[in-house]
Amino acid sequence: MITKLQFSMPTVFQLNKIEKACFGKEAWTVNNIIGEYQNEFSHLFGETDGETIVGYVCVRIMYEEAQICNVAVLPQYRRRGIGTRLLETVADFSKVQGCERIELEVNTANVEAVELYKKCGFEVVGTRRDFYRRTKRFPTRDAYTMLKQLTR
């Protein structure tokens, strides 16, 4: 079940655990996650299995645009529709907030994520060269900018 995540240190620690499992050295720190909770524009939603958060999304609502900051699902819970449900929740929430579109950046080599976003109605609208720091996870530093229109 997906719910809006309320701030608590146990929740922050669970999100940090997901971050580390998904992103390794590029993971958001505990302080980064706390910072998102303190940001009045940020909203976090999570999928739980019992008491355990197994996937989450962070979105910032800025006037007519929603910006997805992060989507992460524990590796052992992938391919179960969690990412799709998280993105659908963000779309529904963003519409209610008056957003016209949702935007995100994703590494051009992150094929699984790009395919998930396309499946959920996002389109590649541009490429940002050298957007990311060099890492061992992906052979490129380039990012696609992807957009989903909520209103036409």
Image (spheres, rainbow, N blue to C red):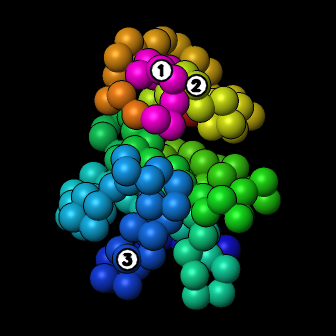
Q: Where is residue 95 drawn, in percent x and y?
A: 52, 45
Q: Residue at x 71, y 31 (%)?
A: 115
Q: Residue at x 45, y 59 (%)?
A: 19
Q: Residue furthest front?
A: 136
Q: Helix, strand, or loop for circle 3?
A: helix
Mark 3 residue crowding within 10 angstroms, few (<14) / some (14–19) / many (20+):
some
Q: Are marks 2 and 1 in contact (CB under 8 Å)?
A: yes
Q: Earlier in the sequence, mark 2 or mark 1?
A: 2
Q: Are marks 1 and 3 in contact (CB under 8 Å)?
A: no
Q: Quadrant of the N terminus?
A: bottom right
Asked if the stretch drawn in magenta spans residue 8, the answer is no
Report which residue position mark 2 lands on. Answer: 109
Query: Which residue is at the front of the view, 21 or 51?
Result: 21
Report which residue position mark 3 lands on. Answer: 13
Q: Where is residue 41 drawn, in percent x and y?
A: 27, 52
Q: Which residues are magenta?
A: 136-147
Q: Which three-letter amino acid code belongs to the residue tagged 2?
A: Ala
Question: In the figure, is residue 16 to the left or right of 50?
Answer: left
User: Could you tell me how far apart the alpha carbons at marks 2 and 1 are, in whole angstroms?
Assistant: 7 Å
Q: Earlier in the sequence, mark 2 or mark 3?
A: 3
Report which residue position mark 1 lands on. Answer: 140
Q: Residue at x 37, y 50 (%)?
A: 25
Q: Where is residue 44 drawn, in percent x and y?
A: 42, 62
Q: Which three-letter amino acid code belongs to the residue tagged 1?
A: Thr
Does residue 147 show up?
no
Mark 2 residue crowding within 10 angstroms, few (<14) / some (14–19) / many (20+):
some
Q: Residue furthest right?
A: 80
Q: Residue at x 78, y 54 (%)?
A: 79
Q: Where is residue 86 drawn, in percent x and y?
A: 61, 55
Which of pointers 1 and 3 indicates the residue nearer the eye? Answer: 1
Does residue 36 show up?
yes
Asked if the stretch drawn in magenta spans residue 144, the answer is yes
